[in-house]
Each structure stands twice: as structure tokens, then as C-alpha cells.
Amino acid sequence: MMDPYVKEVRRFRMEHTQQFNSDLHLICEDLRRFESSLGDRVVTLEPRKIQTTERLRNL
């Protein structure tokens, strides 16, 4: 059974991809432009620190 929300997201993604003839550079550029128009509605998280285990430290 297909989730209707997943189906909608996939449909939108395909339409967006076709607008830019599958050119990943143009797609990302458009998404960055859209993201910048959102202002403070976009959350930017600090990078997470990688926690290494004792075993990895001894390698």
C-alpha cells in the first residue's frame, strides 16, 4: 500500500526535476534560492561531534 503523503512528495519532486531537465546543479540552485527566501523559518543546527569508541582510538 502506497502512503499518500509519500506519493505526493514523489510527484512534486519529479515535477521539480523535470522543470530543470534533471540538471542537479540547477535543481540545487533553485532549492537554495527558495530556502533563502524563508528567512528565519529555516533551522540550522550545529554539527554533531563524532563520539569515538575506545576501540577506534587504539587503531
Image: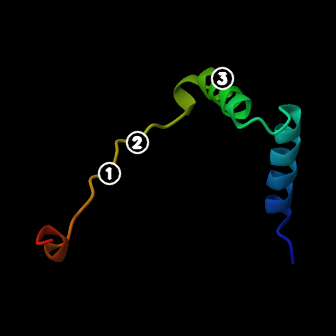
Q: Which mark is residue 33?
A: 3
Gap between marks 1 and 2 measured at Cα: 8 Å
Secondary-structure class at tag 2 = loop
Residue type for callout 3 = Arg
* Vertical placement of residue 6 versus 18, above or below: below
Position of 2 with respect to 43 (left or right) is right
Q: The N terminus lies in which quarter of the figure?
A: bottom right
Q: Residues within 10 Å of mark 2 (few under 14, many from 20)?
A: few
Q: Nearer the viewer, residue 3 or 12?
A: 12
Q: CA distance from mark 1 to mark 3?
A: 26 Å
- Front-most of residues 16 and 22: 22
Which quadrant would residue 29 be assigned to in this image?
top right
Please name the amino acid that badge 2 sits on.
Answer: Leu
> According to the image, label 1 marks what residue?
48
Please tell me whether residue 11 is drawn above or below residue 44 in the rendered image: below
Q: Residue furthest left?
A: 58
Structural crowding at the residue carrying mark 1, measured as other residues with C-alpha within 10 Å and reported as few (<14), some (14–19) or many (≥20): few
**Residue denoted by label 2:** 45
- The reply to whether discs 1 and 2 touch (Cβ–Cβ < 8 Å) is yes
